[in-house]
Structure formats: structure tokens, C-alpha cells
Image: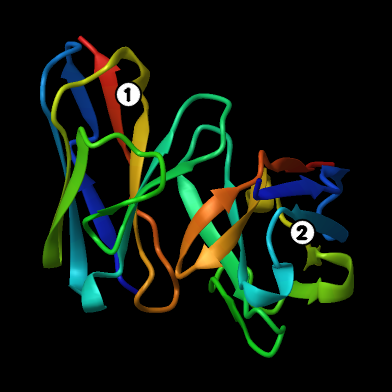
Amino acid sequence: QVQVVESGGGVVQPGRSLRLSCVASGFTFSNYGMHWVRQAPGKGLEWVAVIWFDGSNEDYADSVKGRFTISRDNSKNTMYLQMNSLRAEDTAVYYCARDQGYADNWGQGTLVTVSS
Amino acid sequence: EIVLTQSPGTLSLSPGERATLSCRASQSVSSRFLAWYQQKPGQAPRLLIYGASTRATGIPDRFSGSGSGTDFTLTISRLEPEDFAVYYCQQYGRSPRTFGQGTKVEIK
């Protein structure tokens, strides 16, 4: 069955960096774009970024543009989110999801806490 | 950026009742690129509807979506106990792919 699993979350100080990973299984990873979506504690969903199936294009929310970079390694069935210059407002559960325009399969998320 | 406004913020209903959730866009959503998700506490969101009205795999037919342009609706015909959750709409026709703020369906 289709499965995506996030990892790499944790506690990080403001201004520091963190890299999240998303490992996919149960489908041909290289045929699909992939999303990152986040949810701050007690808040709604916020779309973060998407990467095309072949990594040829990326798109970001304005709130993370210039600080976050989405990438993928199709040989490893893995997508990444490099998060630099982290801020307190980046504290959230980060979900990865398969792209069909919409997001049709979601992981359980990984929690990122930005705090001194 | 397309802003999605969901109403009401909270819907208090009893099992067996009909739920009608609204999602209004600040600009027309192209080609009905509108999805609905359900999220229960401590869980990841689950896709319910895409293309404004197409149910995702495994979604019961008590869930239905309708609308076009700027006005969209999610209807749950008869609420089951497992349907009490938060529901989000999302447009994916234009970047950035924005979500609404959510509607909580709670037990009355």
C-alpha cells in the first residue's frame, strides 16, 4: 500500500537549520510530485512546498521562500525539506504527501519545535 | 493568492443529521481544482473529495462535494459518530495551493 514516512524533526534554536526526510513506498516514487504541508499547534493546515516528479521544478509558500529548499532523490525514494534560518513561527508538525494536484496520501508527520 | 474562507467555524450537530460546510474563494478556482480533507485529533489529514465533487478511494457515499467558481460545498448526508472532525478545503489550481481555515463538526 502507498506509504510515506517523515523523519528528522526535533527541537532547534532560532536561526539554526534542520533537514526533514520523507521516505515513500508502495508506489513508483519517480512518477509523482510531492508536497510538504505543516500545521502549527492548534492551528490549521498550511501548504509549504511542492516538487515536480523529476525534481525539475519547485514551488514554495511565501512564508518559507528563500529559507526552505525542497529536493528529492528518486534513487532512494526520498524527498527532503532543508529548513534554514528557522523562526519560532516555523514550529509545527510537518507532513509529506503525494501530489496529484491535491494531496492524496499523507504521512503521520514529524514535529519541529523552534525554541531557545 | 487565493484566500479560502470556510463557514461556519464550528457546526454542532447530532448523529444522523445532515452537515453542510461551505468554502468560498476570493477568486475563481480554475477547473474546479478544489479538494476537501478530514482531520481527526492526533491524525494526519485524509483526502475526501477532489475536483470539487469526486470522492477519493474508499470514501463513503454519504460524503458529497459540489460547487464551482468561488462557492463550494461539502455535504455529509447523515452524520456517523466517526465523522465528527475538522474539515479543510484546499484549492490546487493556482500557486500557492492554499487551504481554508477549517470547519469543526462537533457532537451536539
Q: Does mark 1 fall on the same chain as mark 2? A: no
The image quarter containing residue B24 is bottom left
Tell me which amino acid carries mark 1. Asp
Q: Which residue occupies the foreground of this view, A115 or B73? A: B73
**Circle 2 sits on which residue?**
A86
Image coordinates of residue B50 in percent, x first then y, are: 33, 58
Q: Which residue occupies the foreground of this view, B102 or A6? A: A6
Q: Is residue A71 left or right of residue A60?
A: right
Q: Is residue A61 left or right of residue A65?
A: left
Q: Which residue occupies the foreground of this view, B57 or A81? A: B57
Tell me which amino acid carries mark 2. Leu
**Circle 1 sits on which residue?**
B83
Image coordinates of residue B81 in percent, x first then y, are: 31, 13
The quarter in which the C terminus of chain A is drawn is: top right
Q: Residue at x 56, y 51 (%)?
A: A105
- Of all chains, the one bearing label 1 is B
Q: Is residue B65 above or below residue A30?
A: above
Q: Nearer the viewer, mark 2 or mark 1?
A: 1
Image coordinates of residue B71 in percent, x first then y, are: 12, 60
Disc 2 to disc 1, how far (Cα)?
36 Å
Image coordinates of residue A45 in percent, x first then y, are: 48, 48
Secondary structure found at label 1: helix
Q: Residue at x 52, y 60 (%)?
A: A47
